[in-house]
Image: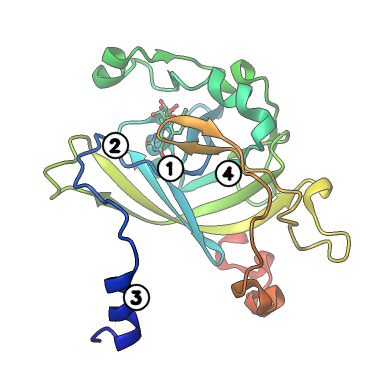
Amino acid sequence: MPASKATKDRAASAPQPDALSVDPAILYFGTPVVLIGTENEDGTPNLAPMSSAWWLGWGCMLGLNASSKTSENLRRSGECVLNLPSADLVGSVDRIAMTTGSNPVPRNKIAMGFRYVADKFGLAQLTPVPAEAIRAPRAIECPVQMEAVVENISDFGAKNPRIRTRLMAVELRIVRVHAHPEIMMKSDSDRIDPDKWRPLIMSFREFYGLGGKIHHSTLAEFPESRFRPPVKPYETPSSG
Ligand SMILES: Cc1cc2nc3c(=O)[nH]c(=O)nc-3n(C[C@H](O)[C@H](O)[C@H](O)COP(=O)(O)O)c2cc1C
């Protein structure tokens, strides 16, 4: 659609900010940290930090290195728990940052200084507890724990010459959500209160929290209850 006269006038009169053409090595602009709980082939729990994650309705997309233990476990078991640490759990996340549940450590990770750790829950000082609908572990200290089953796994970036590692995109269906009562709204025990939920954010490999709310949101005027799915989580086909 052609720009309106008002838009053209504004473009002509407003001071233009500089925007250089730049070439960053990475494009990690800032997303919440997730601690993925998966079950290893011998039944022990694995826990791995990741942050290439986003949610749509009761679905989630993950971007994962195809060689991680988590990816192997997801392909085999088809299940995981997305544990969301709050900003005050940053020490737990950082303690397991340079570790893998893969033994031996993949060659590319040896070069980066990663080491094998069998008990990453222990190293993180977090507690594995059983999920309700699946076998993957929850981390009870995380204020949000989402049980999920794999819907689809596909290659990511296979044709992109600027992506050098084997990556995969994992589509998940969320089947249960657990949350600490402290982050729920007083007026509605099914609604997470964004004034109380303090996610840990990874931006360009550094840790951040959120500041407070900065503006009224016109989008949020539409009632949250209108997004509620027509079926209950326990009525989903996989939950048995
Ligand atoms: C805060 C943080 C965020 C990360 N984000 C991702 C990510 O989005 N995708 C990914 O594949 N690896 C990510 N990593 C690296 C994984 O944690 C790393 O590959 C780890 O070895 C995986 O553990 P696993 O081999 O036991 O599954 C991240 C690491 C940290 C500390």
Circle 1 sits on which residue?
Answer: 74
Q: Of callouts 2 and 1, which one flags the residue occurring earlier in the amino acid sequence? A: 2
The answer for how far apart the CA atoms under marks 3 and 1 are is 51 Å
Q: Amino acid at mark 4?
A: Val
Q: In which quadrant is the C terminus drawn?
A: bottom right
Q: Are marks 4 and 2 in contact (CB under 8 Å)?
A: no
Q: Is any part of residue 22 visible from this angle?
A: yes
Measure how far apart labels 2 and 3 are at the Cα level: 33 Å
Disc 3 marks a residue whose amino acid type is Arg
**Which mark is nearer the camera, 4 or 3?**
3
Q: Residue 26 shows which numbered tag?
A: 2
Q: Residue furthest right?
A: 186
Q: Residue 40: tell me if it is visible.
A: no
Secondary structure under tag 3 reads: helix
* Separation (CA) of disc 2 from disc 1: 25 Å
Image depth: mark 4 or mark 2 in front: 2
Q: Position of residue 28 (x, y in %)?
A: 37, 41
What residue is pinned by disc 4? 81
Respond yes or no on whether mark 3 lies under 8 Å from ligand 1. no
- Residue 6: give its label: none
**Viewer-closest of 199 and 212:** 212
- Name the N-terminal-most of marks 4 and 3: 3
Q: Is residue 80 above or below residue 154?
A: above
Rendered location of residue 48, percent (x, y) = 50, 31
Residue at 71% across, 48% down? 197
